[in-house]
Amino acid sequence: DARVTQTPRDKVTEMGQEVTMRCQPILGHNTVFWYRQTMMQGLELLAYFRNRAPLDDSGMPKDRFSAEMPDATLATLKIQPSEPRDSAVYFCASGLGGLSGEQYFGPGTRLTVT
Amino acid sequence: RKEVEQDPGPFNVPEGATVAFNCTYSNSASQSFFWYRQDCRKEPKLLMSVYSSGNEDGRFTAQLNRASQYISLLIRDSKLSDSATYLCVVRATGTASKLTFGTGTRLQVTL
């Protein structure tokens, strides 16, 4: 049963620290997404990639966030320096792209910045 | 104004009841529509796509009204296991795979 995996599942860190979240998309999926979910804002798209190339990162604060896909099996989202307002659940999702609306989400990383 | 708007609920209904959720979208260029389900502290999962002609999947019926720019989800004979948050999702023309999610409507089905 193919799944998107994410690590870590939970992260508590102090303000100013660097945070790196990792995602392994489903093998064969060519599109990878990073979302952030909070109670107030819901699910927000931060960035997405197709065939490892970044297509859109307009949802991401550029000064502190960065997203990369070093290879087809790994996507990373980095926050440096982290701030309390970054506390949220970060989801990675992958899909086959095109007209399909089906995106397969990972279990998420719950980030708390104190 | 948000691109996709939903009543956050919660909708509290007894088991066996019929419940309906609506969702409105602001971008008239929106091309594809979906309902996702998210259980508490879990990831979202695709429930069903919404087609112009309407579609049904068991106890679930989805409908689209392009003129009024709204989407609906009807759940018949509610089960306790239907308790979850239902996310309305829209994809605009020319945005490739990019989806816009509503903040969700929470459903609680009780005995």
Image: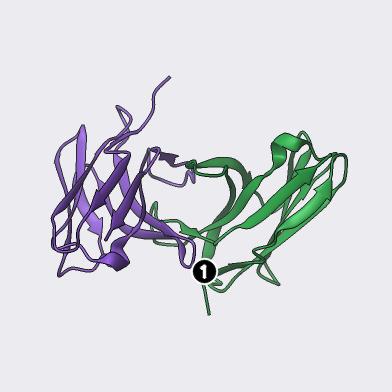
**In the image: residue A93, left or right of residue B11:** left
- Is residue B26 shown left or right of residue B73? left
Rendering colour mode: by chain
Density class for disc 1 (Cα within 10 Å; few <14, some 14-19, many ≥20) is few
Q: Secondary structure at mark 1?
A: loop
**Residue A59 in sight in this render:** no
Q: Is residue B25 above or below residue A29?
A: below
Residue A3 vs residue B95, the one in the foreground: A3
Q: Which residue is mark 1?
A: B29
Residue at far top of view: A1
Q: Residue B41: in sight, yes or no?
A: yes
Q: In this structure image, what is the colour of chain A? A: purple
Chain at numbered mark 1: B
Q: Residue B76 in the image: x percent, y percent?
A: 83, 42
| B69 lies left or right of A74 | right
Residue at image position (32%, 39%) is A9
The chain drawn in green is B
In the image, A112 versus B89, the foreground residue is A112
